[in-house]
Amino acid sequence: MASTATTQHDVIIVGAGFSGIFLLYSLRKLGFSCRIYEAGNNIGGTWQTNIYPGVRVDTESWHYQFSMPEVWEDWSWSEKYPSGEEIRRYFAHIEKKLKIKKDVEFQTRVVGAQFEREMSRWRIETEDGRVTESQFLVACPGSIEKRYTPDFPGLNKFKGGIYHSSRWPREGVDIKGKKVAVIGTGCSGIQIIQEVAKEADTLTVFQRTPNLAMPMRQIQILESEQKFAKVLYPHLFRDRGRNLTGNTAEFIPKRTFDASPEERRARLEDNWKEGGFVPLLGGYADFLMDPEANREVYDFWASKTRARIHDPRKRDILAPLDPPFPIAAKRSCLEANYYEVFNQSNVHLVNVREDPVVEFQPYGIATSSGAFHELDAVVLATGFDAVTGSLTNMGLRNTEGKPLKEEWEDGAQTYLGLTINGYPNMFHVYGVHGPTGFSNGPTSIEMQGRLIIDAIQRMRANGLAYVEATPEAAVAWTRKADEIANATLLPKADSWYMGANIPGKKRQMLNFVGGLPMYEQLCTEALSKWDGFRLESLAN
Ligand code: N01
């Protein structure tokens, strides 16, 4: 195909969230000509689209940040778990320090891209009709970019406001005195519910599966504490990459039932007092493998949580005696007063497993029991076509012209959670078969970013035109991701980790769940020898 491109770069990066920023900043320093194409109009990725009330980071702020001293040395977090507003200020600070925006083209959506072997170049098409050529394409669209709205009958007949959690109006929504429904109780739903309950006349929550939410135990951080923390930051950033999930909480290297009942109880209580994800990630190492060990953690969670809910009916729906799935096999949310919200007399709870939505009507929702819920506004906190959706939604085609969307209908395949066969010189970050959903974002993003940057530099040094994952390597890595997951209880839940939240989507583990140290080791070994890659040298 003849080239009509007007713009040429070494690297095109898609998306200006943590991943895109890290790649751009690092590659630019090494002298590569790079641009970010970003569909939105600011840097910050998911934190610019998810601006719903109550949005908050649920990882400790000292971990949820870049490790570059030029960013952290004069930035202070005010809370252990920062609000969306604070994280948006953090991105403004990043801009001040790293000057990212001068190399970002905003409101530039990638709608097609294909690698041309003869030229060893990517041709990237954007919505505005332009074509750009580059040697490398780095896809950083995030894992929750493509929102999911269930096909509820009559949805478009509803005369009130309908708001998906990831498309909240910038000008806000006046909830005061309104009859509001929230459908979905994932992390977005739980954060929204706690805020909406403060102002709505009535709040009706439609729950399909309980979220086994953990106590957040928020802490305000004093400036003096920040100063002290910064002394520790270099150690913390080194150590977070050695931790399974990129945080600090460590599993106890012991099987649950090797500990006495008293020891186990004391551990559960201590972890509960600490809160956050410590009750899960600071537990015994086998709790995600052994159903009985998992049940013990669930029973403890249920006893603590049930005690907070007054109404027995709501108690059984929110925190049933029998686990709806193995605890931690779906993403738990951190909450401050989620369960107390249901003690308010104006907060209603519909269990859609027993009483499903029949249809939306102009002024409310009818359910199968014959109930009608009168409403002014509905919040759809119904999640995303997570992990794969953002990649299959940007018009990527393999070297033969076949869309990735079609190729992955029977399941996604990647090599190292970084590359795809048929997509030479393309890398993806924080996506399919990487540590993604099981990692602290900035930790795994920096790890994957360093692996990619090293690979690109070695390609240049060794005169390689392109590298491409072999089909065999992709099959083997995909199988490995499944095998590691199959040794755990994770496949037993219908989660977005497994692609099971989207009707018709192939059920498979979409993340690498072996932990960051193993991930880094496997990738480093393979990339250093180009194991599993086909190499093409530059023509002399
Ligand atoms: O989406 P979800 P999310 N009828 O898919 C329900 C990250 N995040 O936006 O569980 C009724 O988790 C669905 O029910 P079920 C975080 O990684 C982080 O909340 O499938 N209900 C579920 O309850 C998170 O995991 C933060 O049975 C329906 C909900 O909708 C990820 O983003 C904050 C339904 C969807 O939950 C996604 O979270 C927010 C239907 N037809 C998000 N279809 C942080 O704090 C779906 N549901 C960093």
Image (cartoon, helix red, strand yellow):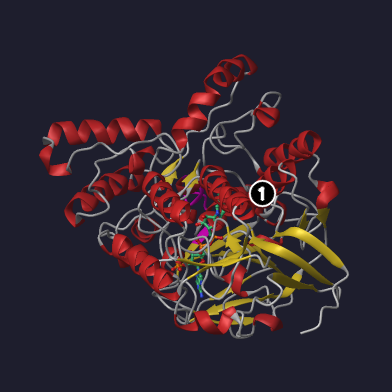
Please provide percent x and percent y for residue 24: 71, 48
Q: How many residues crowd mark 1 within 10 Å: few (<14), some (14–19), many (20+)?
A: many
Residue at mark 1: 23
Residue depicted at 82% across the width and 63% down the height: 8
Residue 527 visible here: yes
- Considering every residue shown, the one lying at the far front of the view is 540
Can residue 151 be seen here? no
Badge 1 amino acid: Leu
- Left or right of residue 427: residue 267: left
421 in the magenta segment: no
Is residue 235 or residue 321 the one in the foreground? Answer: 235
Residue drawn at (30%, 30%) of the image: 270
- Image quarter for residue 352? bottom left
Q: Residue at x 57, y 56 (%)?
A: 429
Does the stretch in magenta take in 346?
Answer: yes
- Left/right placement of residue 151 relative to residue 437 reads right
Percent position of residue 458, x then y: 58, 51
Closer to the camera in the image, 451 or 205? 451
Q: Position of residue 497 (x, y in %)?
A: 43, 63
The N terminus: image quadrant = bottom right
Does 514 sit left or right of 158 as displayed?
left
Q: In which quadrant of the rendered image does the C terminus lie?
A: bottom right
Q: Which residues are magenta?
A: 340-348
Quarter assignment of residue 537: bottom right
Comparing 498 with 151, the one in front is 498
Tally of numbered discs: 1
